[in-house]
Amino acid sequence: MHRIYSYFYPYKDEPVLDYVRDLRENFGVAYNAVMSMAINLKIENNEIGLRDDVNINTIDSRWQHDSIPKFIALLNEFYQKKDFHKFLTNHMDLYEKSVDNFSNNVLNKINFNWFEEFYGTKSPEKQLLMDSCCKVKTKYELFDFFSCCILLFGSRKL
């Protein structure tokens, strides 16, 4: 957490974070809405974009359709100007440790059938478990942004 915070805190007033704050305050884009976006993103040729197979209607409805291109453009600007790729590759050990910990201490111990048995029905929605490498206890918008970035880091080959 310290590495993430010390690298990114100086950029807390970047346009992408201002926009994320606005989306959170005005449209409730937070928590699972952030992950709904993150799982639909890709990084190719040092650029962030929507995956080719994404149907924009499957992204959480708190993301206004006209907000998505602006968010991606601002995220790209941040990713490139702040050399985010270098940060990610330099901290692969953090990611690998987190994946191992999550796999060994969470995924391997969950009885997924319990949920269907408890609720009496299978969820119609795709369920994803996400591990976050950081737990920020300050501003939620920083948590949301870092979670989104960490998810990108964790779900893509670098």
Image: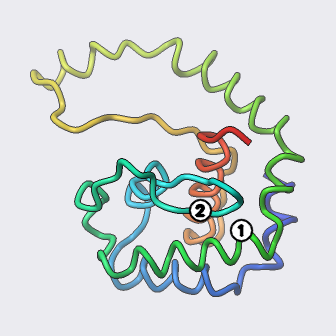
- 23 with respect to 117 (left or right): right
**Quadrant position of residue 32:** bottom left
* Residue closer to the observer: 90 or 17: 90
Q: Please tell me whether mark 1 or mark 2 is closer to you in this view.
A: 2
Q: Position of residue 42 (x, y in %)?
A: 55, 52
Q: Residue at x 50, y 76 (%)?
A: 71
As displayed, is residue 26 above or below residue 33?
A: below
- Label 2 environment density (alpha carbons within 10 Å; few <14, some 14–19, many ≥20): some
Residue 79 got which mark? 1
Q: Position of residue 153 (x, y in %)?
A: 67, 47
- Quarter of the image with the C terminus is top right
Q: Answer whether labels 1 and 2 touch (C-beta < 8 Å).
A: yes
Provide the secondary structure element on which disc 1 rests.
helix
Amino acid on which the number 2 mark rests in the picture:
Ile
Q: Position of residue 74 (x, y in %)?
A: 59, 79
Q: Residue at x 63, y 87 (%)?
A: 15
Mark 1 → mark 2, Cα distance in angstroms: 8 Å
Q: Position of residue 129 (x, y in %)?
A: 45, 34
* Residue closer to the observer: 62 or 73: 73
As displayed, is residue 127 above or below residue 90?
A: above
Q: Residue at x 75, y 71 (%)?
A: 80
Q: What residue would you read off at disc 2? A: 48
Amino acid on which the number 1 mark rests in the picture:
Tyr
Q: Residue at x 60, y 80 (%)?
A: 16
Identity of the residue furthest to the left in this view: 120
- 6 with respect to 104 (left or right): right
Which mark is first along the chain, 2 or 1?
2
Total numbered badges shown on the rendered structure: 2
- 18 with respect to 119 (left or right): right
- Label 1 environment density (alpha carbons within 10 Å; few <14, some 14–19, many ≥20): some
Provide the secondary structure element on which disc 2 rests.
strand
- 67 with respect to 120 (left or right): right
